[in-house]
Every structure is written in C-alpha cells, then in structure tokens.
Image (cartoon, grey):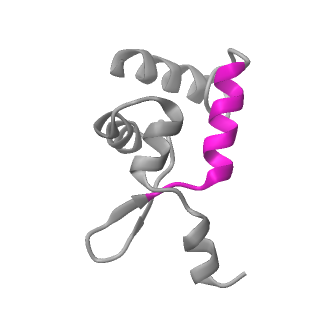
C-alpha cells in the first residue's frame, strides 16, 4: 500500500472526537499524554489516527477493559483518562 492510500485511511481529530464523543481539545490532550497514539503529518504537524487504534480503544472501553499494552501502562492510561474528564 502506498503512502497516499495509507494517509487517506487515517482519521482526523474531528472524526475521532466525534467517534469518541469527546471535545477535540480533549483528544489532543490525550494524544499529548500518550493515552492515544497520533501521527503527525504535514508542515503544521496535524494529527492523524489509525482506524485500527481507535477500534481497539472503543472495543476495550466497551468491554470495561483498561486501555494500554501491559498492566502498568493500562493503569496509567486509565488514570490519565479519568483525570482528563
């Protein structure tokens, strides 16, 4: 898959904030805090998100599972999520 195709499948801040039902500034803060992975593109450094990452986040949240890769990271991410709301 070429880079243009990959970029077209990435989601914008607006799209992800609507999916997660959070303000776009909250999503940016989560990205800065490492709660959710964002990729910076272009000269302005716009954030883009992989649909797979958002789907995993939504699935974990819907099952009540901590968000993260391992137990300590998961708890840190959950704590950050709670504090950001």
The front one of 1 and 73 is: 1
Q: Main secondary structure of the magenta part?
A: helix
Up-down relation of residue 64 to residue 55 (above or below): above
Up-down relation of residue 60 to residue 27 (above or below): above
Which residue lies at the image location 47% right of the left edge and 48% below the top edge?
Answer: 15
Which residue lies at the image location 43% right of the left edge and 39% below the top edge?
Answer: 17
Q: Please give left or right for residue 11 compared with residue 22 in the image.
A: right
- Magenta segment includes 73: no
Which residue lies at the image location 34% right of the left edge and 63% below the top edge?
Answer: 46
Task: Please provide percent x and percent y for residue 50.
Answer: 59, 56
Examine the image and state in which quarter residue 82 appears: top left
- Count of number-bearing discs: 0
Q: Please give left or right for residue 41 compared with residue 66 in the image.
A: left
Task: Please provide percent x and percent y for residue 6.
Answer: 62, 73
Task: Give the quadrant of the N terminus.
Answer: bottom right
Task: Please provide percent x and percent y for residue 85.
Answer: 36, 18
Residue segment shown in magenta: 48-62
Q: Please give left or right for residue 70 compared with residue 48 in the image.
A: right
The front one of 70 and 60 is: 60
- Magenta segment includes 49: yes
Which residue lies at the image location 69% right of the left edge and 21% below the top edge?
Answer: 62
């Amino acid at each position: 898959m070429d880079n243009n195709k990959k970029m077209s499948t990435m989601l914008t801040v607006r799209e992800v904030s609507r999916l997660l039902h959070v303000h776009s500034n909250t999503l940016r803060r989560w990205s800065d805090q490492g709660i959710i992975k964002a990729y910076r593109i272009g000269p302005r450094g716009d954030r883009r998100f992989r649909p797979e990452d958002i789907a995993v986040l939504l699935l974990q949240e819907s099952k009540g599972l901590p968000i993260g890769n391992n137990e300590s990271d998961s708890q840190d991410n959950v704590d950050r999520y709670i504090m950001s709301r």
